[in-house]
Amino acid sequence: RDVVLKVENLKKYFPVRGLIRTIGWVKAVDGVSFEIRRGETFGLVGESGCGKTTTGRTILRLIEPTDGKIIFMGKDVTKLKGEELKWFRRKAQIMFQDPYSSLNPRQTVFEIIMEPVKFHGIQVDDPEEFVIKLLESVGLNETHLYRYPHEFSGGQRQRIALARILALRPEFIVLDEPTSALDVSVQANILNMLKDLQKEYGFTYLFISHDLGVVKYMSNRIGVMYLGKLVEVGPADKLFENPLHPYTQMLFSAIPIPDPDIAREMKKKRMKVTGEPPSPINPPSGCRFHPRCPYFKAGVCDKKEPPMVEVEKDHYVACWLYAKA
Ligand code: SF4
């Protein structure tokens, strides 16, 4: 499958301001590389503050990257301007956790959906019919056309946000914790709808979540982030059956596993989640996970950063247990 998005050594640092000058940098994303193939869902997981949301927003240039390359459909996004940037803004969309803040409370559903359509100069013969079709494809209907966001539930608001995205016929959508504010029953409906729409339109997704069960359900491949870095990338089933990085093992051991075969396998590797992630302002030397790692080897792990190595086909890990020093 061809690659829709390629991220190379992406960095995003935020300044820590003192009274007079910058006194340090929060290295929220610090040299992340991965690619997403057409029609797949790439899941990004990690504890809060690991940089997954910043990665998603930087890729879309909602915040400007500090360094690195973002290649979208062959174009370097960091260099786009004018009409090309506008093209990118149409082709790459984001669905937020809280649709309330992204829907203008003073606009009707019709206006909310038509606004970006007009902005991008997309010609539609019959706007009303166009919007009704979109609403139907997300499980709403024409009775919702002239109502306001406050009249809808959280799940329905996510459907409206999705209809607005569909109106632009994007190639790529960042789904940033799209269901974590919703009830579990509603969550499943939205997730299944996202899967169905992906099948129908061939969308490519970057799915960001701290909920491992949801990520496993949605993703073809998964990247695990820790303190601004990717520590493991691989096919979703391989990652859950055979997590290689000690941090992935730690993270995955904290979730209940419904599949008994996988649960048995995991039990062998079960570790307790211990400690808090250190500050991204002064991350630990060498492997950033070393202060929490049960396999820590002094003189190796705290000295040099482990490289990302391919351990089995398409399954990569950055840990000195798998690389030669
Ligand atoms: Fe643990 Fe060392 Fe691997 Fe880091 S490199 S995860 S400290 S074994």
Image (cartoon, rainbow, N blue to C red):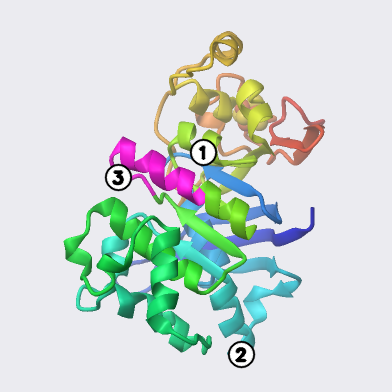
Eyeballing the image, is 140 above or below 110?
above
| Viewer-proximal residue among 171 and 200 | 200
Q: Which residue is mark 1?
A: 215
Locate the C terminus by quadrant: top right
Can residue 297 be seen? no
Q: Amino acid at mark 1?
A: Val
Q: Residues within 10 Å of mark 2 (few under 14, many from 20)?
A: few
Check if mark 1's residue and mark 2's residue have beta carbons within 8 Å: no
Q: Residue at x 72, y 75 (%)?
A: 75
| Viewer-proximal residue among 133 and 183 | 133
Q: Amino acid at mark 2?
A: Glu
| Viewer-proximal residue among 152 and 145 | 145
The kind of secondary structure element at disc 2 is helix
Q: CA distance from mark 1 to mark 2?
A: 35 Å
Q: Which residue is mark 3?
A: 182
Q: Which mark is residue 83?
A: 2
